[in-house]
Image: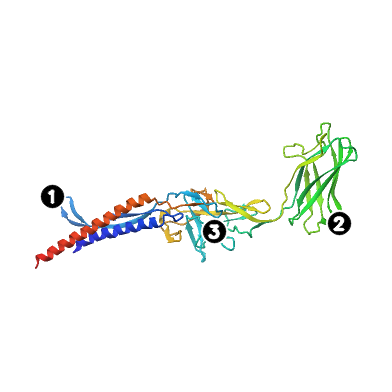
Amino acid sequence: MSFFSTPLSGLSASSAALQAISNNLANLNTDGYKDQTTDFSDVFYQNLGNSGNGNPIQSGLGVQVSGVTSDLSNGAISSTGVSSNMALNGSGYFVTQDSTGAQNFTRSGDFTTNTAGQLTTQSGQLVMGFPAVAGVVNGSGKLQALNVGAGTTTPANPTSEFSLTANLNSDTPIGGTQTSQIDVYDSLGSSHLVTLTYTKTAENAWSYNATVPSADIAGGTGTSTSVGSGSLTFDSTGALTSTPTASLSVGPLSDGASNLNMTWNMQDGSGTDLLTQTASAGSTSASTQDGYAAGTLASFSVLTDGTVQATFTNNQNRAVGQVAVASFANPEGLTLSGNNLYTVNSASGAAVIGTAGTGGRGTITGSSIEASNVDVATEFAKMIVAQRSYEANAKAITAFDQVEQATIAMKT
C-alpha cells in the first residue's frame, strides 16, 4: 500500500541523521574536522480537494534529506611544540598538491616533512606557498612546495663595516702600544683576524696599523700583512677629533674570495664615540661587524602571516617562504574527499589564494593544530532525537502493517 512510503522516508531520513552524527563522533579527534548537521524538508503533497472554506486539503508524502551543512567555526587551537604544525585561526584553507599536480585544500595543519625537506600533509600531499629569494617573499610568485629541510642554506656575507668599542689609555707613554682584534668574513665565508695596533705618537695623538696573518694573503710573506693605517687625534676631554671612519682593504685573499673592502666606524649611528682616550686601563669592550659565514638551516617557525622564518647555523634569520591560504565564496560548497581534504566545485566557486591575515583570511598559529569542533554533548542530544524519530517511524510502519493485515482479513 502507498502509505508505507511515508514512514519509510522517515526511517531513511533518521538513518541519514544518525549516519551524520556517528561520523561526527568518529571524527571527534580528527584535526580540523568540521561538525556536520543533516537538514530535512517535506516532499510533494497529494491534493485531496478543498474544504468548505476553500482551503486545500493536502496529504504529505514524507520527508527527504535537503542538505548537509557544516559548522565552519574554529575548533580549539592547542600547542604541539612541533614547528611543522600550524593552525588557522579564522576562515581559510591551507593549499596542498597531490602527486598528479591537482590542488586540494585542508584545515588540518598536522604537517610533517618528507625526505626532501618539503612540508607535507600526513597523506603525503605537498603544502604550497609563495617562494622567498634572499629572505624576501614574492607574494605574487607562482605557488611552490615549501622546503624547510636541513639542506636549506644561506650564503656567506662578506664584512663591509665593523666597529670597536675601545679606550686608549692616555697615561700610555709616547711610543707605547695597545691592540684590538676582530674577526671578519670574506665572500666565501672564511674568517680573518684583523689586529689593530695603536701606537701613541704624542699627547692626544695615536697612529694605528691594521694587519691580518700573511697566510691569508695570496703571496703574503712574513707573519702579518698591513691592510690599512692612519692617525687618530683626541681633544682634552678624550673625545675623538679625527675623521670617525677609516677604510681597510684585505686582498688578494689566498682562499680565492673577493677582496675585502671594509669601513671602520669609530662612532655609532647617533654620533657617540666608540673610540675614546681617557686615563683608565686600555681595553676593547665590544665589537660588531656585518659579515657572516655560510649556514645551514637549524630550525624554523611559522609567523602569524604564514611566513616561514628559518634560523641558520650562522645565527642568521631569514624567510624561506610563506604559507598560502585559500578562501572561497561559498566554503560550505566544497567537496569532502577524505584525508581531511576538500576540492573545489561550481558550488564553492574558485579558490582565491593569498596570505594569512589578508582578504578576510584568518591568521596562522605556529607549532599548533586546530582540533575538531565536534561537541560530544550536542551530538548525544541529536542522537537521542534521531533515535526517537527512527523508532516512531518504525512504529508507524508496524501500525500500517496491522491495518493492512486487518484489511486482508476482511476479504476472507
Q: Are marks 2 and 3 in contact (CB under 8 Å)?
A: no
The amino acid marked with disc number 2 is Gly
Name the residue: 78% across, 46% down.
263
The amino acid marked with disc number 3 is Thr
Q: What separation in Å lies between label 1 and label 2 (alpha carbons)?
A: 118 Å
**Relative to residue 356, is residue 152 drawn left or right?**
right
Q: Quadrant of residue 33?
A: bottom left
Locate residue 355, reporting x and y percent.
Answer: 53, 51
Q: Can you say which quadrant of the picture contains the C terminus?
A: bottom left
Q: What separation in Å lies between label 1 and label 3 (alpha carbons)?
A: 72 Å
User: In this rendering, does residue 136 appear at all?
Assistant: yes
Name the residue: 86% across, 41% down.
231
Residue bearing mark 2: 220
Locate residue 93, reporting x and y percent.
Answer: 48, 54
Residue bearing mark 1: 52
In this rendering, which labeled residue sits more in front, label 1 or label 2? 2
The earlier-in-sequence mark between 2 and 3 is 3
Q: Quadrant of residue 221?
A: bottom right
Residue bearing mark 3: 112
